[in-house]
Image (cartoon, rainbow, N blue to C red):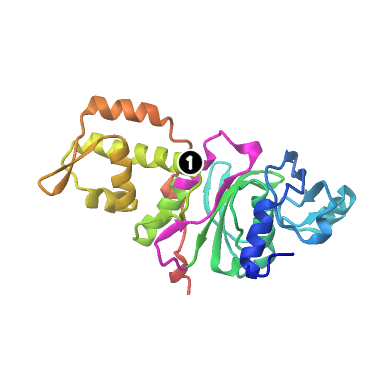
Amino acid sequence: QGHEELDAASLREHEEFTKVKNIAKIELGKYEIDTWYFSPFPPEYNDSAKLFFCEFCLNFMKRKEQLQRHMKKCDLKHPPGDEIYRCGTLSMFEVDGKKNKVYGQNLCYLAKLFLDHKTLYYDVDLFLFYILCECDDRGCHMVGYFSKEKHSEEAYNLACILTLPPYQRKGYGKFLIAFSYELSKKEGKVGTPERPLSDLGLLSYRGYWTRVLLEILKKHKSNISIKELSDMTAIKADDILSTLQSLDLIQYRKGQHVICADPKVLDRHLKAAGRGGLDVDVSKLIWTPYKEQG
């Protein structure tokens, strides 16, 4: 035993951290996907090397026959929430964890198979989930999601983010990050992703911040302040400062920050930051912030 001094939460975290990957594969829609990490599924699933997920309600089963039976009964063809964005074949759904508890928990179990986080939020009531889907005549198929606290003290506009492996490297992760900032702009707030960021997360955000900020600097030359950049982009001032510092584009002179915006240097950094993924067409976003939803 020897774990007396650990409280229940730390113990669970310790167990998750030290456990070996339990589920080796999942089937989701038309894909069979190899998993990456341990996920704390209920104990009765411990002996299953493969789980079968309903791609619409995210219920999971041990056997293909169970899934087939379930699919005959399940009448969902998209995530159980409001469609807040549609552009071409892409749709985004907002799912309230309190109204759709089982879906939220299923999503967390699924996501944890691909996220190297120490803990998983078991309390989905406090979160909104934004589910990105590719839609066709069979329904809306989840490609990835991000979650967001309903009421964040620290101005976090994103908690977890994941693009499912079959859909990675197609610009969806960048789209999800951009989408989280468009929501912040609509709320009239600055936002920042929850810390700590994974290495990969930081890399993605650095790329996003670099592209957005340098495009603005190219237009405005140097005569723009960090505060103005923050107001225009909803990016937190600290993130703007650290991004510009990492690119050597800011100097501290006479007690204030001065941005250096040589067009050649900006172009070089923009090129290095890579392409921006899919654009969010803000005219297609129809959304009311949570606190105004009554």
Which image quarter holds the N terminus?
Answer: bottom right
* In front of the other: 54 or 163: 163
Q: Residue furthest front?
A: 2
Apparent side of residue 205 relative to residue 244 in the rendered image (left or right): right
Q: Amino acid at mark 1?
A: Lys
Magenta stretch holds residue 169: yes
* Residue sitting at x 49%, y 66%: 150
User: Is the residue marked by circle 1 packed among few (<14), some (14-19), or many (20+) residues within 10 Å?
Assistant: many
Dot 1: what SS?
A: helix
Magenta span covers which residues? 151-177
Magenta stretch holds residue 188: no
* In front of the other: 234 or 273: 273
* In front of the other: 43 or 217: 43
Apparent side of residue 205 relative to residue 257 in the rendered image (left or right): right
Location of residue 156 in the rendering, given as x and y in whole percent from the top left corner: 43, 59
* Residue sitting at x 60%, y 48%: 116
- Can residue 213 be seen here? The reply is no
* Residue sitting at x 68%, y 70%: 4
Location of residue 99 in the rendering, given as x and y in whole percent from the top left corner: 62, 69
Query: Is 148 situated above or below 64?
Result: below
Q: How many marks?
A: 1
Residue beneath disc 1:
174
Q: Residue furthest left?
A: 254
* Residue sitting at x 61%, y 64%: 10
Location of residue 178 in the rendering, given as x and y in whole percent from the top left corner: 44, 46
Query: Is 215 situated above or below 52?
Result: above
